Image: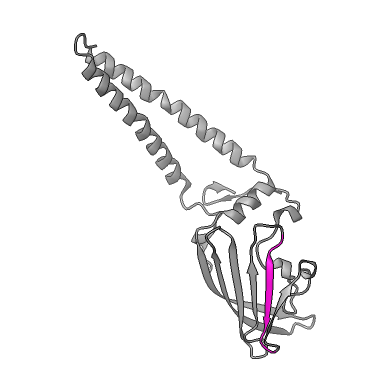
């Protein structure tokens, strides 16, 4: 089932992330300096420099890394704030915290009179070795649609492959690209809506931002 912690836009603790970034950058700045100081001090045996001077230069070198770290954090923050709607959608689609997923879902159909029909669905999704998504939706109930299955295969080309299995006819029907606008199982969804969308088919506009758990989104 879907969990908030799996939200690709969710940042668990941004302050912790920044602290870890600064700490790692600080360590990476110190290690080469320590190695070079030790190496040159051992090589300079004939006329060694005063240890106090070497330590001061070493500390000044470390202090010089902090402006660079702060500048990079500021630039990264500004770049994130200036992201376009298209870039946000692109990251939302490509960034995930799982390689495969399984879920139990329900499709609820309501008509104008308020009557509803419920469809129980077993949902499976995984990526292949090329990072292309494979998604299967298998209807489990009620009896009149049980066994009906819908398979979507993401391709490296423009259009994904979509297949519908109809148990009553015992055959597989391929949904052509020209027919992807048809209604999916008598719902308001189209076959195009099921699966990975093509970003180039839409125009995205960033309407605004809001703060969530201390992070501007």
Location of residue 156 (image quadrant): bottom right
Position in image of residue 63 (x %, y %): 38, 24
- Which residue in the rendered view is the most extreme toward the top? 47
Secondary structure mostly seen in the magenta stretch? strand
Position in image of residue 188 (x %, y %): 75, 73
Location of residue 49 (image quadrant): top left
Location of residue 74 (image quadrant): top right
Q: Is residue 67 magenta?
A: no
Q: Is 47 placed above or below 35 here? A: above
Which segment did they paint magenta? Answer: 159-168
Of 46 and 95, the residue lying toward us:
46
Position in image of residue 2 (x %, y %): 53, 67
Apparent side of residue 129 relative to residue 168 in the rendered image (left or right): left
Of 177 and 184, the residue lying toward us:
177
Q: Residue at x 50, y 58 (%)?
A: 97
Position in image of residue 203 (x %, y %): 76, 51
Q: Residue at x 69, y 48 (%)?
A: 85
Q: Residue at x 21, y 11 (%)?
A: 48
């Amino acid at each position: 089932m879907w969990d908030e912690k799996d939200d690709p836009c969710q940042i668990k603790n941004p302050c912790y992330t920044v602290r870890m970034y600064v700490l790692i950058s600080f360590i990476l700045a110190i290690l080469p300096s320590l190695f070079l100081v030790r190496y040159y001090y051992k090589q300079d045996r004939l006329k060694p420099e005063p240890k106090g001077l070497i330590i001061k230069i070493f500390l000044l070198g470390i202090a010089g890394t902090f402006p660079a770290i702060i500048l990079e954090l500021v630039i990264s923050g500004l770049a994130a704030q200036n992201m376009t709607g298209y870039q946000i959608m692109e990251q939302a689609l490509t960034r995930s915290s799982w390689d495969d997923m399984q879920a139990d879902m329900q499709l609820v159909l309501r008509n104008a009179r308020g009557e509803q029909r419920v469809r129980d669905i077993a949902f499976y999704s995984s990526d292949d070795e090329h990072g292309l998504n494979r998604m299967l939706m298998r209807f489990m109930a009620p009896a009149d649609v049980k066994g009906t299955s819908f398979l979507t295969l993401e391709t490296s080309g423009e259009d994904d492959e979509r297949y519908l299995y109809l148990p009553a006819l015992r055959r597989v029907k391929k949904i052509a690209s020209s027919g992807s606008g048809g209604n999916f199982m008598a719902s308001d969804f189209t076959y195009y809506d099921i699966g990975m969308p093509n970003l180039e088919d839409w125009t995205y506009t960033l309407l605004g931002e809001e703060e969530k758990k201390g992070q501007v989104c």
